[in-house]
Image: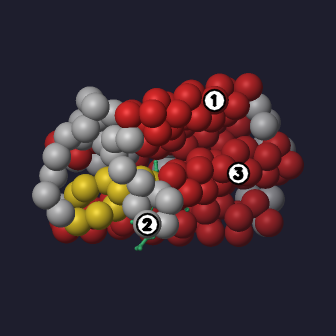
Amino acid sequence: MNARLSRRLVGLAAMLGIMGATAVPAQGADGRIPIMVSASERDRVLEEMRVFLHGLHNIFHALSRRDMKSVAVEAAALGREGQTMPAALRNRLPVAYMEMARGLHEVFDAIARDATAKADPFHTLGQLGEAVSYCSGCHDTYRFQIGRITRSPDQR
Ligand code: HEC
């Protein structure tokens, strides 16, 4: 695990500790923290999620062909430029959620950059491992719940 990722995970753990202490927001029955969203917000984010999964699929196949040019193109599409979340939702999401989302976009930008500059498939594989730890870190922590939208102290 690289230094940047461990810093973020330590930050996340600290934030979850604070949330645990104030018990806001409450954890759901499955232990994940629910984020209240509208049906259309949920659909929109889930669509972006499926784009992530397709993107990973394309990157793995390109990597297995040592086609670093395609790796770069696919990864760049998942980087910060490709971010599509509406501002109204973005501003309401927990800070830790946004940290992980930002971290993930940054890793994809780094994958795109290094696929061109270094063209080393094993280096890319390590970066993909880092990307997937953001996927699972966020999925382990949060879930969406459709319902009345409220703010909590953890949200900005
Ligand atoms: C910052 C948080 C976050 C990150 C990072 C994240 N996800 Fe998600 N993802 C979610 C949430 C929240 C859901 C909805 C889960 C729920 O409500 O049960 C979700 C759902 C999904 C779904 C289900 C889509 C559907 O149509 O039902 C897929 C697939 C998915 N994510 C893939 C990924 C992949 C692949 C990555 C990493 C490349 C990733 N996600 C990174 C938050 C995140």
The three-letter code of the residue at mark 3 reads Leu
Asked whether the viewer can see residue 99, the reply is: no
Q: Residues within 10 Å of mark 2 (few under 14, many from 20)?
A: few
Using the image, determine if residue 62 lies above or below residue 101: below
Residue 49 spot, x, y in % from top left: 44, 62
Q: CA distance from mark 3 to mark 1?
A: 20 Å
- Give whichever of 8, 117 is nearer the camera: 8
Residue 136 spot, x, y in % from top left: 60, 56
Residue 20 spot, x, y in % from top left: 46, 39
Residue at the image position 40 percent from the left and 47 percent from the top: 82
Q: Which residue is mark 1?
A: 10
Q: Identify the disc placed on residue 29.
A: 2
Residue 114: quarter of image: top right
User: Is 149 positioned to the left or the right of 142 in the image?
Assistant: left
Indicate which disc, 3 or 1, sits on the residue closer to the N terminus.
1
Q: Residues within 10 Å of mark 3 (few under 14, many from 20)?
A: some
Instruction: Locate the C terminus by quadrant.
Output: top left
The three-letter code of the residue at mark 1 reads Val
